[in-house]
Image (cartoon, grey):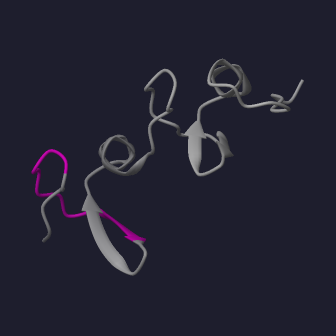
Amino acid sequence: MPQCETCGNEYDKNLEIVVNGISHYFDCFECAIHALAPLCDHCGCKIIGHGIEAAGIFFCCAHCAAEKGVVGAHDHV
């Protein structure tokens, strides 16, 4: 039984998430998010929704993108 990559817990119902052909094992979604979710380039929070990508840089929302100079990004309203 694989260990969780984030917390080290051994759990019989673990999650296997494959990223670019590489398997990662976690005991819960929280640990998977901690390990795999990208960070917002402006505020540093984990992006667990759609987020915004501009020129290869990730943001959690249009506000953070605009704060870094991205023009034309809009949140859904």
In which quarter of the view is residue 3 placed? Answer: bottom left
Residue plotted at (65% across, 39% down): 51
Residue depicted at x 9% and y 51%: 8
Measuring from the top left, give residue 48's x and y in whole percent.
53, 40
Main secondary structure of the magenta stretch = loop
Q: Is residue 9 above or below residue 21?
A: above
Q: Position of residue 14 (x, y in %)?
A: 27, 62
Displayed quadrant of residue 34: top left
| Camera-nearest residue between 11 and 49 | 49
Residue drawn where x is 72% and y is 31% of the image: 70
What is the span of residues highlighted in magenta in the rendered image?
A: 6-18
User: x and y percent of residue 69 in the render?
Assistant: 69, 25
69 vs 2, nearest the viewer:
69
Compared to residue 62, the image places residue 53 above or below, namely below
Is 6 left, or right, of 46 in this rendering?
A: left
Q: Residue at x 65, y 45 (%)?
A: 53
Image quadrant holding the N terminus, namely bottom left
